[in-house]
Amino acid sequence: MDRLSKGAQKVQSVLNQFGLELTVIEFPESTRTSREAAEAIGCEVGQIAKSLIFKGKDSHMPVLVIASGKNRVNEKMIQKYVGEKIEKADAAFVLEQTGYAIGGVPPVGHKHHLEPLIDEDLMEYAEIWSAAGTPHAVFKLTPGDLLSITRGKVVAIK
């Protein structure tokens, strides 16, 4: 675990710029889904901060939602915040907009600047875990750290 894969190292480099002690950890097992990540880490599914990319139906702009692993995103709620209908983005769009594949999208370090909508339920935990560039990499942070590094907006998503 001393040497990180290229994608995880890229995220670690971005995290280092924030001056916080945020450390990427890679697991031999998959952390692609919230359940897999929680099992590998040994935490509650709700502590997983999953970064989901949607696409504006008319604008085709990316919309980043950072949701608690225990929650399903209510797309109608998100549409109210962004002012247009949204749809789930396909794998090619996610890679094009973020530079990362689905299952490894971190909350920061994307190809294009994205200001996320952050699930209010993540705020109830002392610590949360987020993907770190690959389907095997994660990092631990606090909800306050998440707000600080993303400059996101806390909203109801369910």
Image (spheres, rainbow, N blue to C red):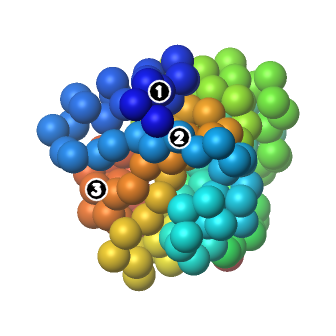
- Give the labeled residue for mark 1: 4
User: Element type at marker 2?
Assistant: strand
Horizontal arrangement in the rendering, residue 39 relative to residue 66 (left or right): right
Image point (63%, 27%), residue name: 100
Picture quadrant where residue 34 is located: bottom right
Please indicate whether residue 103 sits to the left or right of residue 57 in the image. Answer: left
* Helix, strand or loop under label 1: loop
- Looking at the rendered structure, which numbered label has been put on residue 26? 2
Q: Is residue 113 in sight in this rendering?
A: no
Q: Label 3, on which residue?
A: 145
Write the residue at 34% across / 57% down: 141
Q: Amino acid at mark 2?
A: Glu
- Is label 2 in contact with label 1 (beta carbons under 8 Å)? yes
Q: Is residue 67 left or right of residue 90?
A: left
Mark 2 nearby-residue class (10 Å; few <14, some 14–19, many ≥20)? many
Q: CA distance from mark 2 to mark 1?
A: 7 Å
